[in-house]
Image (spheres, rainbow, N blue to C red):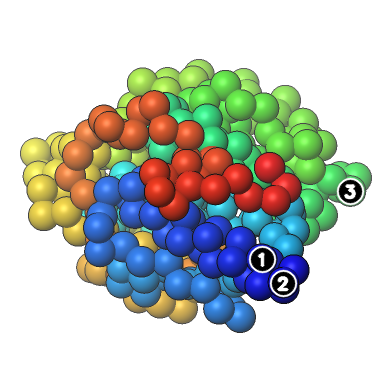
Amino acid sequence: MAETDSQGALEAFRQSTSGASRAIARREEFEVEFGADGPMAAGNVLHLKSPGEGLPYAEVARVRGQADAASVRMRHHDGEIHARLAPGGDIARRIFDKLEQTRCEALGSRHMSGVAENLGAALEERFRLAGYDAAIERDDSALPDALALLAREAMTGAAPPPSAQRMVDMWRDDLQPKVGELLEHLSEDYVDQRSFAKRMRSILEILGFPDDSPEIDEDSDGDGEEGDDGSSALNEGESGEEGDGDPEQMDGVDMRDSAGDSSDDMDNLDDMDLGSQEMGDESQEMPGE
């Protein structure tokens, strides 16, 4: 009987996570599938590694954070704009990709405290696994993460996760005098992906990263948060991206050719706490909450 109850709770969690992801992404065709591997997104399907029976808290937090990160990216990211405005150079592109994901997460969490908590828990786990909590000296490879967390702080007011606090502190005194003011202005631009990208390019220029990509065309289409055609290339790893350029990077999720949406805000989701997966008839308090 206990095993049946555990399996029932796991299935309820899967269903509520799928429902929450569709609501956040605002795409009815968006599906979440659970299995032995993940996370990876292909088209409109997000594959996640299922939490174990009994729904251990850490595994539930991981799954929710990964699902929310993919959902807000699908909701707010336009792959064509990103590809057109992305800089050249490996490090510059990594920074550009991470800041874009941070923008999407800031937008997705601004009206939903549960989503903000899920994303924060996922970041805490990722940076703990990266060993940032044990850092004893500044490592240049951590620069993209440091900038992303400083940008997150500027846009949302959220301090870096505890596991990354030490790493961010090692970078803060060097970065703030150079780009601190521009980072603060990101909160003015983050609703508009194109304006945000321009600000990111300015930050990269100040930090001295060479850029061999074409200049931004001020008169080109797609000035909004997402393109009119609703396309969004969400790629990572060895997957290709729409248009030219290197694959996009989204931490923790392998994203492949997903589509975005053309709305500007969360509208009817404003009062929903999706962090608790409160999705109508599917809602259920999950163990560990």
Who's the residue at 69% across and 60% down the image? 55
The Cα–Cα distance between marks 2 and 1, rounded to whole angstroms, is 6 Å
The foreground one among 277 and 239 is 277
Q: Kindly indicate whether the residue at mark 1 contacts the one at mark 2 (C-beta within 8 angstroms).
A: yes
The foreground one among 130 and 210 is 130
Disc 3 residue type? Ala
Secondary structure of the residue carrying numbered label 3:
helix
Who's the residue at 52% across and 25% down the image? 156
Q: Position of residue 40 (x, y in %)?
A: 48, 72
Q: Quadrant of residue 44?
A: bottom left
Q: Name the mark on residue 5.
A: 1
Give the vertical position of 191 relative to 157 (above or below).
Answer: below
Who's the residue at 60% across and 31% down the image? 150
Give the vertical position of 36 relative to 99 (above or below).
Answer: below
| Quarter containing the N terminus | bottom right
Q: Quadrant of residue 217?
A: top left
Question: Which of the two discs, 3 and 1, labels the residue nearer the N terminus?
Answer: 1
Disc 2 residue type? Met
